[in-house]
Amino acid sequence: MLRQLYPLCAQTASLEEIYRPDAVSSQGEDGLWRANMVTSLNGSVEIDGVSKSLSGRADRKAFHIIRAFADAVLIGSGNAISEGYTSIPDQSPALTKLRRSRKAPLLVVTTRHPEALSTSALVASPDQVIIATLESKESDALQLASSFQVAPKLLYCGVQDFDYRKLREELGQLGLGHVVCEGGPSILGRLVGAGVLDEICLSVSPLLAASHHGGFLGQDNDFAPTRLHLASIIEDDGTLLYRYRIAAKTASQHGSCQK
């Protein structure tokens, strides 16, 4: 049974209300960039190479609700390969009602090495996906695109190093303002460093598991200490669902007690 631990309320808010995006982000645009990850109590982000082994009932429900509010799902190429992403499947009618546009979010994959995706499940995607890469990798990206069942849309963000601010701008121009990043840890750390995230949604599973990635933000990222504002905590059968706003962003009102 879901229990709202913060803010303290007489009645637990629904997960739909907890995770409903702001109408306008603190960056002055119609959109919200979130990270959504699950971790063990000691910081592992996977068991046997996949994150779903850490996921419980409440986390899975929150995962699908957060996706329902998103225009796009953003992942790194390593995550796309290891988790076998193709595209984001259509959602249930109840979740579709939460959306402001298409039936399912568009999948956006970032990569510095487009050729690494040539043997991934992405090439057989029945839906168009977006591949974001470097300008210096244009020829490799075009070659990769030619192997897809449905030609992907290509975005070029940066020359030698990835420009996540430009990616946010490019996706916003495509009408993809609400974005959820589902990992892996390396890209999440880079998004924090680039200052493009508004919110972090983190599910902590009551498990201990071997950790190889240095936590959900990776171990090789270099970013300044970043203060967060706690927005909500939900508990279900030992799993804790945290929602934090980046301190520099305007605090969300969602998840507050309704009078």
Image (tube, helix red, strand yellow):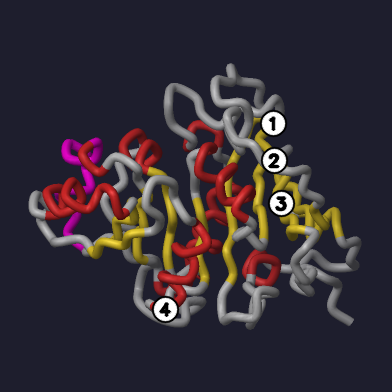
- The reply, left or right, for residue 39 in relation to residue 123 is right
Label 1 near label 3: C-beta < 8 Å? no
Pointer 4: residues within 10 angstroms few (<14), some, or many (20+)? Answer: few
Q: Label 3 belongs to which residue?
A: 1
The one nearer the camera, 229 or 193, is 193
Earlier in the chain: of badge 3 and badge 4, it is 3
Residue at screen point 80% across, 59% down: 247
Q: Label 2 sits on what residue type? A: Thr
Q: Label 3 sits on what residue type? A: Met
Q: Label 4 sits on what residue type? A: Gln
Q: Label 1 belongs to which residue?
A: 206
Tag of residue 239: 2
Label 4 SS: helix
Tell me how far mark 2 sits from mark 4, CA to CA: 37 Å
Q: Label 1 sits on what residue type? A: Pro
- The reply, left or right, for residue 65 in relation to residue 152 is right
Q: Is residue 128 above or below residue 192?
A: below
Residue at screen point 17% across, 40% down: 118
Relative image position of residue 68 (x, y in whole percent)? 48, 67
Pointer 3: residues within 10 angstroms few (<14), some, or many (20+)? Answer: few
Pointer 1: residues within 10 angstroms few (<14), some, or many (20+)? Answer: some
* Number of numbered tags placed on the structure image: 4
Mark in the foreground, 2 or 4 = 4
Earlier in the chain: of badge 3 and badge 2, it is 3
Earlier in the chain: of badge 1 and badge 4, it is 4
Earlier in the chain: of badge 1 and badge 2, it is 1
Q: Label 4 belongs to which residue?
A: 173
Label 1 SS: loop
The segment highlighted magenta reads: 116-127
